[in-house]
Image (cartoon, helix red, strand yellow):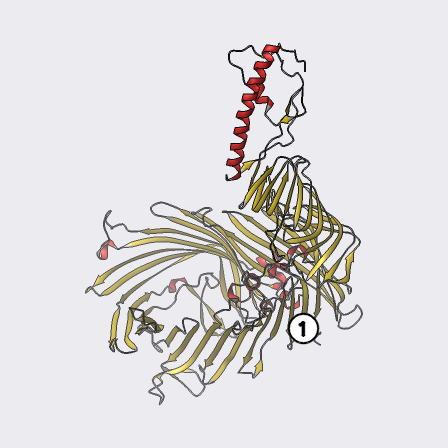
Amino acid sequence: MAIQKPSHTFTKIHLKALRTNIFQILFAVSFTVFINTFGYSQELPKKEPVAKSEKTNDSVTVNVKSLLNKPIVGKEQDSITNDSLPKKKNLLEGIVKYSATDYTSINQNEQKIYLYNEAEVIYQNMQINAGIIVIDYANDIIHAGRLKDSLGNYSQAPVFKEGNNVIEPDSIAFNTKTQKALVWNSKTEQQGGIIISPLTKKENDSVIFVHRAKFTTSEDHENPEYYFLLRKAKIVPNKKVVTGLTNMFIADVPTPIGLPFAYFPLTKSRTSGVIFPSFGEQNDRGYFIQNGGYYFAINDYLDLALLGDYYTNGSYGFRAESNYAKRYRFRGNFSFRYENLINSERGFPDYSKSSVYNIRWSHSQDAKANPNSRFSASVNLGSSTYYQQSINQLNSSNFLNNTLSSSVSYSKTFQGEPQVNVSLTATHSQNTNTESINMTLPTFQGSVGRVFPFAPKIGSKKGFIQNINFQYNVRGENRIQTTDSLFFKKEMFDDAKIGMQHSIPISTNFKVAKYFSVSTSANFQENWTLKTIKKQWDQSQQEEVETVRQGFDAFRTYNFSASLGTTLYGMFNFGEDKSIQAIRHVMRPSISYNINPSFDKYYDTYEETDVNGDPVGDVEYTRFEDFLFGTPGKTYSSSLGISVANNLEAKVRDSDSTATEPKKVMLLKTLNFSTAYNIAGDSLNWSPVRVTGGTSILKDKMNINFGATLDPYALDNNNNKIDKFNIDNGGSLFRLTSANLTVNYTLSSDSFEGGSNPEDQRARDESLRSGGRADDLFGKPQDFADSRLNSDDKKADEKPTDLYNYKIPWSLRLAYAVNYANSRRQNEISSHSLMFSGDIEFSPRWTVGVSSGYDMKNNGITYTQLRFERDLQSWRMNFSWIPFSSRSSWNFFIGIRSSILKDIKYDKRRQADKQL
């Protein structure tokens, strides 16, 4: 940069003006420091060139740039030309903001800024909070540390944040120019894991090096119950941890569990990877590996897990599990399981080989996705013996289940007047004991909303005429009945039945005498079928011969009905000073009348003869005997139905003295009586009286339901019903032919919240998907190594305590059932059982559970499962034991709770002994 020497006069004037500007600048700087010291936040002073005198070595820190740019009024401009070199880049590329609670001190000699008590520094995406911070802006270094009081206690440890990464060390040194840092005694969380390192070198925002660091998932960072010692490791935040020699320490004691090098994945999103298997041994199949495979994180909406089992005797299994979801649209899961089972050894008499499979699919649509159409699926089908023979599926509730059912449906609503609804459904029902299967592929249903042809356009409908309405319904089915051996084979369609039913109901309702409701209806049905039969007598074989005829055929039926009902209220007042102030009785009697004409025109006859050809008699039949929706009625019926519904409710004085209103208590939710009389019948015109009832007591924790059947007719000496009233035969008015009682009781301590435990809910969902019970009366799933059935997170409010736990959390579920049968004077209890399931938390970390029952009819203990669970903070231990029955076995598991280290586990099982 060339500088021309000015004249002497100009130099004096220039120095005088410069001296004046220097005093102004010093005053401004002093005022700025004063304001910044007591202000909210300050910016770090930027380095400026120093203006030096040519004759002396004294220097003054000023902004030369501001002086050169400031013109001198009335004088000739300086002849210094602009610098032709490029401007040097500032060392700080952003503004440094800092603040402190007690004081902020700027030392110009040391070129440092001291921040004391609740200090904070923010630079670009970096933030440091600490008790004390020293900013060395001469060397571009920020030091942060803790405060030490007079007793030697430290507080306000630094918190270093850069982006989403957070480090909590004892002290830190950060270079704002190179973005490197040295951290002492740091604690940083990486996707559920905690890394505790005495010395950490931060290379940049994506690479961190640690020395003798501890990697753990323990919540106790000061004294973790276990950790992996990383002697030298490289950390890429939110991606991975790569280390050299590492081994596990338990309670600071080294263990031989280690590796010469290790890789720990750290990611916020799902990633594909290997699923570590479980190892074990079985008495009849040898050593095995189970549930090992590979997980595919296909995208954000779909995943897939392929799992396999292998046994040294040659048995193997395969599983495919997939989950899918799209927010506000739908979600579901799919599972396919196959097992090839080999028993004993080839050449032995007990050698056998079999294969079983199971398919499960669940799909649900969000209600907001489409209000006019809906698709849902709940599928559970496969081999009838799958849950009994499977050596991998240990869900005891599924083992005791004897029914598999499925349903896949799609429905569509067409808005308008009238509204039209259509649906298409495929169903499946499978009895695992008889191995029989019933399916509908598919069922079509359609309906047109009610039409009121005589209703006024505005206002409410009144009277008989205005309430007349009709609608149209159609139902078509393709029903298949097959067996387990023919399932998914073409033979299963050979005996399929196809039919369609159309119905047009016409009804109306009106009031009579203000308090009585009258309704009348007529229903017309037309039934279509593609298959009918023809019967004839084969004299040579002396048997009936049935011929199937293919082709369209139809029959039509109709019926009429009417009903009259009312509601009666009764109040029994005992006084407001009584504990029970009043009882209200609500009774709803109803009388109905039904007429079903005879449609004998759809019936044919053939003549039966003996071996000599002599006629024996005529046999009547209908060609629609195999129709899906029943046969046309042959006899005329005219019946009168009588029913009475009751409930009882009481008003009782509230135990809370501050309550202003009495408390309502339901004594009987329902108590119903029903019977019928066939006016057109010749004998046994009265139907048995059916009694049903139910109530809830103990704050709705105990549900009681009961039922009974009372027959007015007597029995003869052969225990057959005769057309004679029981009372006329020397008996009572009614004969009790059957009765049942069920009681379900759920109770728990006030502090026990087992029902909301995520682990319990996952286990119950698994049981329901496989057709089991919602409760755990038949036991809980025992596959502890399956993370789907176990929660990775502990209860948020669970904290260890050294105090005596005077409130022991517990829960108990009871189910009592008894059935009585006396239809043919057998006078027996057909079934009588008490099942129970409970859990008790003896200590904050010990839980014991049991599911069992007692069969009072056969005097034996039912299927029993004992459960023991120990919460080891970062670990969990489970032991499940089935002490007796054909499924006698036990299962032990101990492993790390966190999902990132869930493959570090020990799982040991003892399978049930082979039954000879």
Q: Residue 334 occupies which quadrant of the picture?
A: bottom right
Q: Residue furthest bottom?
A: 730
Location of the C terminus by quadrant is bottom right
Q: Residue furthest left?
A: 513
Q: Residues within 10 Å of mark 1 (few under 14, many from 20)?
A: some
Q: At x 41% / y 53%, what residue is drawn?
A: 474
Residue closest to the eye, 830 or 139: 139
Q: At x 46% / y 81%, what residue is drawn?
A: 821
Q: Where's residue 102, x and y in %?
A: 54, 46
Q: Is residue 73 above or below residue 845?
A: above
| 516 displayed left or right of 830 | left
Q: Where's residue 222, x and y in %?
A: 65, 59
Q: Residue 596 occupies which quadrant of the picture?
A: bottom left
Q: At x 45% / y 83%, what residue is drawn?
A: 824
Location of the N terminus by quadrant is top right
At numbered mark 1, what does the secondary structure look like: helix, strand or loop?
strand
| 59 displayed left or right of 544 | right
